[in-house]
Image (cartoon, grey):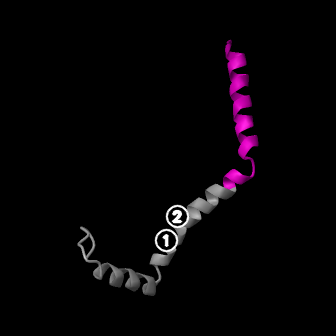
Amino acid sequence: MNPVQNKMTTENGQKDFLKKFGKWAPIIGGAWIVLNIILPLSLLRIPAVRQFIIAAGEKLPFDIPGIG
């Protein structure tokens, strides 16, 4: 394959990929970021949530290194 054909094949492959996932990819990606990064970090800023996590950690029957 010459370089021009190779470039055209690559561009078509990228277009097919974008067509396949189209509008859903950014929505799913954004939801994943919110649920797994932003939401837990924002919950940890609430004092009641922090106190609950500390209390739950103290009730564990085993020791987790780095906690407590």
Type of amino acid under label 1: Pro
Cα distance in 3D space between marks 1 and 2:
7 Å
Q: Is 10 inside the magenta-drawn segment?
A: yes
Using the image, determine if residue 32 lies above or below residue 42.
above
Q: Nearer the viewer, residue 61 or 52?
A: 61
Q: Position of residue 57 (x, y in %)?
A: 32, 78
SS at mark 1 in the image: helix
Q: How many marks?
A: 2
Please rate how many residues cluster around mark 2, counting C-alpha atoms within 10 Å: few if below 14, some from 14 to 19, many from 20. few
Residue type at mark 2? Answer: Asn
Which residue matches tag 2? 36
Q: Residue furthest top?
A: 2
Q: Quadrant of the C terminus?
A: bottom left
Among the 4 quarters of the image, the one containing residue 6: top right
Closest to the observer, 6 or 67: 67
Q: Which residue is mark 1?
A: 40
Residue 67 lies left or right of residue 37; in this view the side is left
Residue 48 placed where, x, y %?
A: 44, 87
Instruction: Examine the structure image and report whether residue 7 is included in the region drawn in magenta.
Output: yes
Residue range (magenta): 1-26
Residue 8 point in image, percent of width and height:
73, 23
